[in-house]
Amino acid sequence: MSPSEVLNAAADARDNAALLGADRAEIPRGQSAWVVREWWEGLTADQRQAYLTAYPSEIGALNGIPAIARDHANRTRLDQYIAQMQANADALYGTPGGPIYDESYEPARKLHSKLEDRNLYLLGFNPDFGHTTRDAPSSPSATPTPPPTYPRWSPA
């Protein structure tokens, strides 16, 4: 996808999220992993997908979201960041589709390549502060246990 297509898809996802009941204000920022997990498990599959697509920065940063979902959200955010930087470089240098002249986001491009070359979960991505990756099993059936999740807590 071109940078403009990536950015347009992100804008469309935000515009359509409310139709599926995905409201940014409902994201439990600053809550414990247990609260976040309960919230996530209470969403429908369509709502989860809407949150992942429309609000990847917020969902990718939440402890309590399953690792696979956080990875999806953070990869989406990484793609959006690279597309935004490419669009900025194109506007600044006037070379749409040409080589990238702005090296300030080279670490993000290297991370993107690293994720394609290795089987990793991207559990955190913030263009200003870095990223967190974890080794992932080669396939869900290659490991006898599911990906890590946070324990449920219930009052006695």
Image: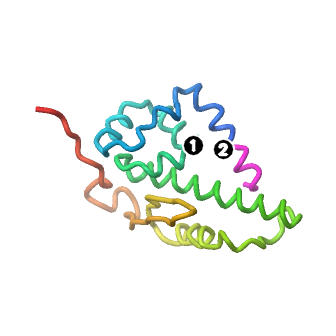
Measured as percent of width and height from the top left, residue 21 is found at 52, 26
Write the residue at 33% across / 40% down. 37
Q: Is residue 8 left or right of residue 152?
A: right
Q: Is residue 12 left or right of residue 21?
A: right
Image quarter hosting the N terminus? bottom right
Measured as percent of width and height from the top left, residue 122 is found at 47, 61
Residue 14: image tag: none
Region rendered in magenta? 1-9
Q: Is mark 1 on a helix, strand or loop?
A: helix
In this rendered view, identify the residue nearer to me: 32 or 83: 32
Identity, as a three-letter code, of the amino acid under mark 2: Ala
Q: Name the residue under label 1.
A: 53
Is mark 1 in CB contact (under 8 Å) with mark 2?
yes
Are there few (<14), some (14-19), or many (20+) residues within 10 Å of tag 2?
Answer: some
- Residue 88 lies, with reference to residue 57, above or below; the image says below
Measured as percent of width and height from the top left, residue 41 is found at 35, 35
Are there few (<14), some (14-19), or many (20+) residues within 10 Å of tag 1?
Answer: many
Write the residue at 59% across / 25% down. 19
Counting residues from the start of the chain, the first of labels 1 and 2 encountered is 2
Figure coloring: rainbow
Q: Name the residue under label 2.
A: 10
| Residue 82 location, quadrant | bottom right
Identity, as a three-letter code, of the amino acid under mark 1: Thr
In this rendered view, identify the residue nearer to me: 29 or 71: 29
Write the residue at 54% across / 47% down. 56
Image quarter hosting the C terminus? top left
